[in-house]
Image (cartoon, helix red, strand yellow):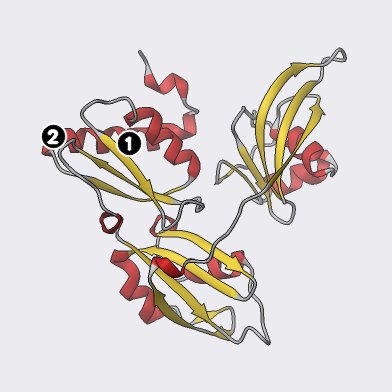
Amino acid sequence: MNLYQHFRKEEHHFLDQVLEWRESVKTWYAPKLTDFLDPREQEIVRLVVGNDPEVKLSFYGGASFVERKRALLYPEYFEPKQEEFELVLFEIKYPHKFVSFEHRQVLGSLMSLGLKRAKFGDILIKEEKIQFIVAKDIASYIQLNFDAVGKTKVSLEQLSFDNIVQLEEQWLEETITVSSLRLDAVLAQAFHVSRQKVQLFIENGLVKVNWKITEQPHFECKEGDTLSARGFGRCKIVSIDGKTKKEKWRVRIGKQK
């Protein structure tokens, strides 16, 4: 069976990586810890590794509700503990009475340190509290170098995961009808904006499909895809329920509250 036919072309490189991880566990009979994976990458790992009797699989990213998690692939004898995932939780201390930060500002400041996105887990914002999760191997570097968000000076406090802020993800479902399953058509209906405006957003790199920037308006959406457009939010395709009498696609979507 050709495994690659079940995945989009742009996912083949990551698929190769997953196959290497799996073979590494089998060859060396030792666990393999990955960097942080987004939910689509986690799904690919599950699909590739999940049914292999020689390789076990666990995910953890600091809490049950987080999106970005590290995967641990391991042989049968191994019993993983939470510490095996090598995570560190930081809280940002800043003058919250005078300034407020958005997710993108915090992420931008972290990325400006020159580290891969895969080394960072979720950024958690609840009221004035801002926390983020990192891989243990970069924690000391972050503590030494992360001292500002934009022009505002900040400091970091390392916390135990017992102190992680609790977030709840809520989705509102609705049904839309679209002329095609093209990305621009689906987003235009989901966010109630013109197709031309959506096309500009896509072409300017402001739209993501399954957490990856997609610059092709004609990209064909599938069931299970998560779409986001900067300034509009996020939606996911829950199901594609066939065509109407007028030959339009009926699509069930969930939108984040």
The residue lying at 39 percent from left, 64 percent from top is 134
Q: Residue under circle 2?
A: 27
Q: Secondary structure at mark 2?
A: helix
- Determine the residue positioned at 57% across, 74% down: 129
Quadrant of the image occupied by residue 84: bottom left
Amino acid on which the number 1 mark rests in the picture:
Val
* Residue 185 shows in the view: yes
Query: In percent of the image, x 24 and y 25: which residue is there?
Result: 53
What residue is drawn where x is 26% and y is 35%? 56
Tell me the CA gap for discs 1 and 2: 14 Å
Locate the N terminus by quadrant: top left
Task: List x then y, in percent, for residue 257.
Answer: 72, 51
Which of 233/16 is in front? 233
Query: In the picture provided, is 235 more to the left or to the right than 9?
Result: right
Looking at the image, which is closer to me, 61 or 206?
Answer: 61
Question: In this picture, is 80 found above or below 131?
Answer: above
Mark 1 lies on residue: 18
Where 208 sits versus 237, above or below? below
Name the amino acid type tagged 2.
Answer: Thr
Q: Position of residue 43 (x, y in %)?
A: 45, 35
Task: Name the foreground residue: 238 vs 183.
Answer: 238
